[in-house]
Amino acid sequence: MNEQIIGLILKQTDYRENAVILTVLTEDYGKLSLVAAGVRKMNSKNAGSVLPYTKAEFSLDYRPDRTMFRMKTARTVSLYRFLHEDLLAGCAASLMAECADAMTLEGPDEESAAETYRLLDLSFQHLNEKKPADLTAALFLSSMLRTHGISPEVDACVLCGKPEASAFSLKEGGFLCAEDAAARNLKPWTIEQLRAFRVLAKAGPEQIDLVSPYFRDWSSMTGILVSFLELHAGIHLRSFGLFQRFFGIEAVM
């Protein structure tokens, strides 16, 4: 049955001669793999619609018992041109797309796929509107952690429950009070850092304009969230290396 499916392209992988495999996140069908034949040819009509971080409409014969399909045609819905023109925006888009790919199962039964699609589409829009790339990435990562139930504890000390926070512990998974932080030789955070991270842990891409004034160095917060994801979910985001170099983020311990 011929279906017209709209999705966000997370990545493009070379496949056989002149073909690629597209990893596509959709709102209604979950994550799919599409074999796009001939798109690497100079005269391909579909080449411009299958770039990573593009929203496109795909024509294919959909079957609910499969996750890989042959793409017939592709039509650009939203190119998000700035993501392909600006290095910082492109780094943030790559990081978010890799995160969405890693945290979404294939097929229509993935309950979080629709929410991930919504978050990623809105975040790509923000990048295309030239909103801060580091804050956009941080809000997306924070929202993904909440969606999957592994968000950091920021309401009280994760060990003793005291409401007064002094530092953040990756290992313990949240804020620590002054006593517990000192026992683990953790450097205290400033009030500005604590407040910004607490807001970040509770906000989503919808609040980007409200969150922005709370802090200036959102890239460091992005690094903490990436490390948190790796430690507590076992997900390593390779694209963070380039993001880290461009934003000058120090390694998070």
Image: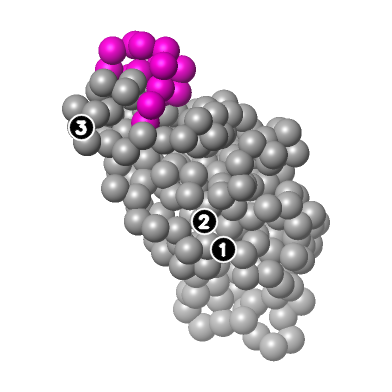
- The CA span between labels 1 and 2 is 6 Å
Relative image position of residue 90 (x, y in whole percent)? 62, 65
* Picture residue at 52% right of the left edge, 62% below the top: 247
For the residue carrying disc 2, how many other residues have a C-alpha within 10 Å: few (<14), some (14-19), or many (20+)? many
Q: Position of residue 130 (x, y in %)?
A: 76, 57
**Magenta range:** 153-167
Above or below 199: residue 95: below
Which residue lies under the disc numbered 3? 184
What is the C-alpha distance between the residues marked 3 and 1?
A: 34 Å
Residue 93 location in percent, x, y?
Answer: 60, 57
Residue 32 visible from this viewpoint: no
124 with respect to 93 (left or right): right
182 or 138: nearer the viewer: 182
Task: Name the chief secondary structure element in magenta.
Answer: loop
**Image quadrant where residue 202 sits:** top right
For the residues labelled 3 and 2, the Cα–Cα distance comes to 31 Å
* 127 vs 112: above or below: below
Which numbered dot is residue 91? 1
Q: Amino acid at mark 3?
A: Arg
Given residues 208 and 18, the one toward you in this image is 208
- Disc 1 is placed on an element classified as helix
Observer-nearest of 146 and 42: 146
Q: Are marks 1 and 2 in contact (CB under 8 Å)?
A: yes
Above or below, comparing residue 9 to residue 87 in the picture: above
Q: Is residue 159 visible from the viewing direction of this image?
A: yes
